[in-house]
Image: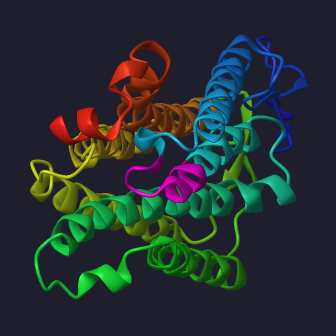
Amino acid sequence: MDTCTTCPDDEWSNQNRDACIPKVITFLSFEEPLGVVLTSISMFFFLITAVILGIFIHYRDTPIVRANNQYLSYILLISLMLCFLCSLIFIGHPQEVNCILRQTTFGITFSITLSSILAKTITVVMAFQATKPGSKLRKWMGSRVSVSIVLCCSLLQTVLCLAWLFIAPPFPYLNMRSFTGTILIECNEGSIVAFYCVLGYLGFLAGISFIVAFLARNLPDSFNEAKYITFSMLVFCSVWITFIPTYLSTRGKYMVAVEIFAILSSSGGILGCIFLPKCYIILLRPERNNRKELIKM
């Protein structure tokens, strides 16, 4: 007590209080069990999505693939593959590069996914309205309008992410205060306002897609995808509404794991709700893959 010595920030005292020892450094790594599980799930869903994309390309001339714009289906599947892969950026030692890429890559890839879903939903409504006599919407039917919707909606998110990086980009941060004797290496978001703006824009796209799909779910269009989109957006919104309080109540690698789980579960929900019914008909019920049967649906 006569000669007290203060330990450096990266060290703390031992049990006998007579020496300083290094603090334990922790982050979500690829080697630990949690990192291995999340990586395996991410790669599994990536491969499943790649297989579904291959099936859609192979059966591209069938009515069920061509319904509701096959090119949007390709864009959506590719963006889902990127969503599953972007979860891997969250695992590993936080450094300046992957801290910058984490949220921006996540925000842009998810905006492409949700923009594709919104474009699919609008395509369903336009296709129904174009069948009415004297409708002027027929000239707007086609892949150009749908792709334009995807580009415009995702471009807004890209501009928002670039502004985030220009004003206050994320950076690696050594958190020495959350747990005694432990240094949490994590990514500081830089601007928490920008982070929630990115999430809010994704929520806006999901909400618009859900409302339009819900209103169009009973339209008598050939293989009306609106009901499947409704379910997928319901899953998506449920996951991310649950994510926010859970994310705020955790620290360190478990906070990162919560966001990865939200990315994987919401992407998997979209994949399952929209594409599994189609794959079921393509592979197991090919007799229903014709225009006459699709109209009955």
With respect to residue 167, does 45 lie above or below? above
Q: Residue at x 75, y 59 (%)?
A: 101
- Taking the image as drawn, is residue 199 in sight? no
Q: Main secondary structure of the magenta part?
A: helix
Residue 177 appears left or right of 30: left
Task: Classify residue 236 by image quadrant.
Answer: top left
Q: Which residues are magenta?
A: 66-76
Locate the N terminus and report the quarter of the image it occupies.
Answer: top right
Q: Nearer the viewer, residue 89 or 227?
A: 227
Find residue 97 and report its horizontal and vertical position in percent.
85, 59
Q: Is residue 15 left or right of residue 215?
A: right
Coloring scheme used: rainbow
| Residue 78 rendering spot, x and y as whole percentages | 64, 48
Q: Position of residue 237 (x, y in %)?
A: 29, 46
- Looking at the image, residue 204 sits to the left or right of residue 54; the answer is left
Q: Residue at x 27, y 43 (%)?
A: 223
Query: Hey, which quadrant is residue 68 in on the image?
Result: bottom left
Left or right: 170 as drawn, with respect to 156: right
Q: Nearer the viewer, residue 49 or 26?
A: 49
For the point 64% across and 68% down, the residue is 190
Q: Is residue 140 magenta?
A: no
Q: How many numbered badges does the structure rendering display?
A: 0
Q: Is residue 1 above or below residue 127?
A: above
- Of 182 and 235, the residue lying toward us: 235
Q: Residue at x 45, y 65 (%)?
A: 115
- Measured from the top left, where is residue 156 in percent x and y? 52, 81
| One can see residue 161 in this view | yes
Q: Quadrant of the C terminus?
A: top left
Which residue is more in the foreground, 285 or 195? Answer: 285
